[in-house]
Image (cartoon, rainbow, N blue to C red):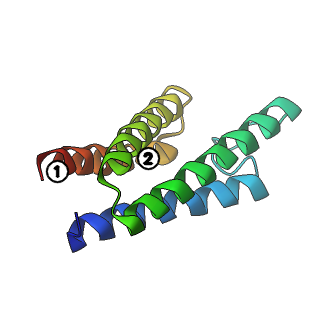
Amino acid sequence: MRNPVFLTINVLATLLTMVVSVLVIADPGFALPAGAEVTAAVDTFARATSIRSLAIGAVLLVLLARGARSGTLALLWVTGLLQAGDAVVHLLNGHPPAAAGAALAVAAFGSAWWLAGH
């Protein structure tokens, strides 16, 4: 599991997700379409989901660093599903730039596929 390409892709994708999460915590409107109102509910939900992403990202980075194969495989499936779901929500809400997270889902699913076979 110490494939440098595998590790690099997953560490970079995880760090990118974590950076976006920090930006959303600082500005809950960051991932919303231009002009969208940031209500109290939007603020709470955006920050809560960002904290979730930070926690999952931190665990994934630890698993990658430790080379924990089974835990990494399971969490890659979870992160892939979350990224894919987030991308669909952003597309349906008219914010295609934020749907770029679909690329992160592809990275997670591709990595899970690779890890399952190696």
Residue at the far top in the pictured view: 92
Q: Residues within 10 Å of mark 1 (few under 14, many from 20)?
A: few
Residue 8, picture quadrant: bottom left
Residue situated furthest right in the rendering: 40
Q: Nearer the viewer, residue 33 or 20?
A: 20
Please provide percent x and percent y for residue 108.
Answer: 33, 48
32 horizontally vs 61: left or right: right
Q: Is residue 25 above or below residue 88?
A: below
Q: Position of residue 47 (x, y in %)?
A: 75, 45
Neighbourhood count class around disc 2 (C-alpha, 10 Å): few under 14, some 14–19, many 20 upward: many
Residue under the point 75% across and 53% down? 25
x then y, percent, for residue 115 = 20, 51
> Mark 2 belongs to which amino acid?
Gly
Q: Horizontal and vertical percent for residue 86?
A: 50, 35
Which residue lies under the disc numbered 2?
101
CA–CA distance in space, label 1 to label 2: 20 Å
34 lies left or right of 100: right
Question: Which residue matches tag 1?
Answer: 114
User: What amino acid is found at the position of numbered circle 1 in the picture?
Assistant: Trp
